[in-house]
Amino acid sequence: MTQGERKATLALSSIFALRMLGLFMIMPVFALYGHQLRDATPALIGLAIGVYGLAQAVLQIPIGLLADRMNRKVLIVQGLMLFAVGGAVAALSDSIWGVIIGRTIQGAGAISAVVMALLADLTREEQRTKAMSTIGMSIGLSFAVAFVIGPFVAAHFGLSGLFWATSLLAVMGLGLMMTVPTPTITLKQTHQTYGQQLRQSVVHGELSRLNIGIFVLHLVMTASFVLLPHLLTDYAHLPASQHGWVYLPIVLGGFVAAVPAIIIAEKKRKIKQVFVAGIALLTVSLVLLAQGYPQKYTLLMGISVFFIAFNLLEALLPSLLSKIAPAGTKATAMGIYASSQFLGAFCGGVLGGILYGLHSISLAYIILALCSILWLVVALTMQSPRFLHSMMLNINPCTQAEAAVLLAKLQPVVGVEEVVVLAQEGVVYLKVDKERLDEPSLKNLVLA
């Protein structure tokens, strides 16, 4: 990576991690401490955990559409501000309904797709897997930290302390935004309507498979963390304040174990094979957890395998998305992806609460394993992504008519797979197959 790419990756991954840390700190303890709130029931506790995902699911697509045409850094700042305000609302509430409102406001800061799109702007295609994997890994790292800090903060400062901490983390994210480089292009010019722009990503078969995948992954993850605290408390007899010391080595171990698989996926161009293996591993972990209530070591093994699979899949999914998404509508595709992600989190929170209310944790994990098996079937039909390279060429600013002529000339060049001409900015973005690229013809056309 260049210095600029490293700086952008580090800053945006840190912003993503801080925001997810604020979210994950709630998950391992809210199912236990939420009963202290007025009007709390198991279903409403599950709703409070999942409503954040519902708000994200509703807003990621429209914000993604805007991010293909507006300043992405401004949208990220606005989202972080909403996250901070929502945390304050939840912290000041003494009823489950106030917490649900606060979590909804936090979810309205739907910037996941914008962060990934901005990172895609600031990195080359051949470096984007590393960049997107860094975001995925930052999520896993935030898991590890959150599962130690969350129980500690809840034990000493209560639920209000947890929510104030999420607001503080959002403010830290705002400070980090000052260090993010400004991309060459912040305004995307397009002839498509918003409806056409959305449809292009919705009907894309390979993107749809990834959207299904991230939905299932976060449904399983969120439902698991409605159920896991009760397994550790009721069976392992661990107080909530000690749960972090179980999660920490397991999550860090999963983080380390996933790294070689990610390297193999990229270096050996085996990303589909590693991806499918990760889903199979996730299924195995859920089957182990379904049997883990009476067997302590089976429970710990199930949690360990779960985090290896989760870290691997969380890193590979955005990398696959960045390779497959059309060049001119990345933020829109990522908006649909992020909506699927958070819709999965919402459904997982509600499903976990309902299943726990039925007092059948084993049945809950069997249902989650069946969801994972369905995902595995879908993933087996996906095509292996092509490994293309990105190029950015400078031209003189021109009219839309001149840009259309240039576009028509560039598309037939051998090895050119995708072209985006930004007329007013004087920039051409291309995805190319370097092994086939007719580079002399390409340069002659641009110079002409």
Image (cartoon, helix red, strand yellow):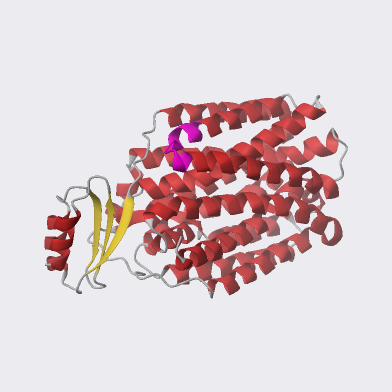
Residue 426 falls within the magenta-colored stretch = no
In the image, taking residue 398 as reference, residue 265 lies left or right, namely right
Relative to 369, say whether 149 is above or below.
below
Q: Position of residue 28 (x, y in %)?
A: 74, 47
Residue 108 visible from this viewpoint: yes
State the image quarter where residue 164 is shown. bottom right
The residue at the point 67 percent across, 38 percent down is 224
In the image, taking residue 143 as reference, residue 4 lies left or right, namely left
Viewer-side residue, 227 vs 246 = 246
In the image, taking residue 217 as reference, residue 189 lies left or right, namely left
Relative to 273, say whether 101 is above or below.
below
Q: Position of residue 318 (x, y in %)?
A: 47, 48
Residue 40 visible from this viewpoint: no
The residue at the point 55 percent across, 34 percent down is 278
Q: Position of residue 62 (x, y in %)?
A: 41, 58
Residue 272 falls within the magenta-colored stretch = yes
- Total residue callouts: 0
Relative to 143, say whether 165 is above or below.
below
The C terminus lies in quadrant? bottom left
For the stretch drawn in magenta, the main secondary structure is helix
State the image quarter where residue 410 is shown. bottom left
The residue at the point 53 percent across, 30 percent down is 277
Relative to 135, say whether 383 is above or below.
above
Please report the bounds of the magenta region as a residue range: 265-276
Q: Position of residue 361 (x, y in %)?
A: 72, 30
The residue at the point 69 percent across, 44 percent down is 251
Viewer-side residue, 75 vs 132 = 132
